[in-house]
Image: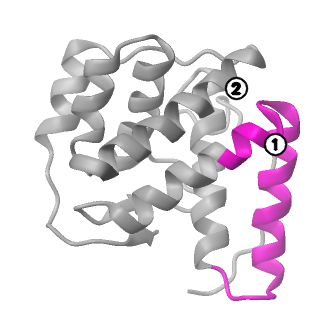
Amino acid sequence: MPERSVSNTSLPQVSTLSTLPSGAAERFVLHVTRQWVGALTAEAGSARLARHIDAWHRAFCVAGGPMASRHWDQFMGLVARRSARKVNVKCCACQQMTMDERRIIAAAGAYQNAQVERGRTILGHWFKGDGMALAEHALILFVDHLSGSGYRLSPPTDHETRSLTIAVLADNTGVTIH
């Protein structure tokens, strides 16, 4: 994948990325998810890797702090390595969201709003058994730290939960980035 020049790695603004979620917390989760995957897929020692790590650290200085960063890293690591399905995450410059990015945001919103069964339903797209319990634990701790920073995610609606659990991709593992 060729490196892209990114002039602004701050959180995306709704006015420029109209198809992205409108809430600050939702944009934050999308931003750190894409930065995490960008760092994971960057060549070791590259400028691209440094940009993604820098953007990750700056984002967590704004919301959640080091503990939120740690728990999100744990959650994303589980998604990347233990998911029953391949996870599709776009690059930081993309203006569209994938169904998997929507699932990640909706699951976080469900847990932050005490909708545990709804969160489990969404996480069930990727996890079963021990993987589910570990992912759930990391996600709950992450959203707790987000709440402490004043970031509130919207809870997923019944319709959104159904649509996110119906769409099924091929049964393979790993992370892809657009």
Task: Name the disc covering residue 145, or none.
Answer: 2
Give above or below for 159 relative to 46: above
Q: Nearer the viewer, residue 142 or 15?
A: 142
Marks 2 and 1 in Cβ contact (< 8 Å):
no
Q: Describe the colour scheme in one phrase.
A: one colour
- For this orientation, the residue located farthest to the front is 130
Q: Locate residue 28, reporting x and y percent.
A: 66, 35
Magenta part, dominant SS: helix
Write the residue at 46% across / 11% down: 113
- Tell me the magenta residue range: 42-70
Q: Locate residue 4, reporting x and y percent.
A: 70, 76
Write the residue at 34% across / 63% down: 82
Please, what is the three-letter code of the amino acid marked with disc 2?
His
Q: Is residue 8 visible?
A: no
Is residue 108 inside the magenta stretch?
Answer: no
Q: Is residue 113 visible?
A: yes
Q: Locate residue 60, reporting x and y percent.
A: 80, 41
Q: How many C-alpha atoms fall within 10 Å of the one at disc 1: few (<14), some, or many (≥20)? A: few
Write the residue at 33% across / 52% down: 131
Write the residue at 24% across / 62% down: 85
* Residue that label 1 marks: 66
Sequence-wise, the earlier of marks 2 and 1 is: 1
Side (left or right) of 71 relative to 127: right
Please, what is the three-letter code of the amino acid marked with disc 1?
Pro
Q: Locate residue 49, reporting x and y percent.
A: 76, 76
Side (left or right) of 42 relative to 107: right
Element under label 1? helix
- Of the 4 image quadrants, the one containing the N terminus is bottom right
Element under label 2? helix
Q: Nearer the viewer, residue 21 or 56?
A: 56
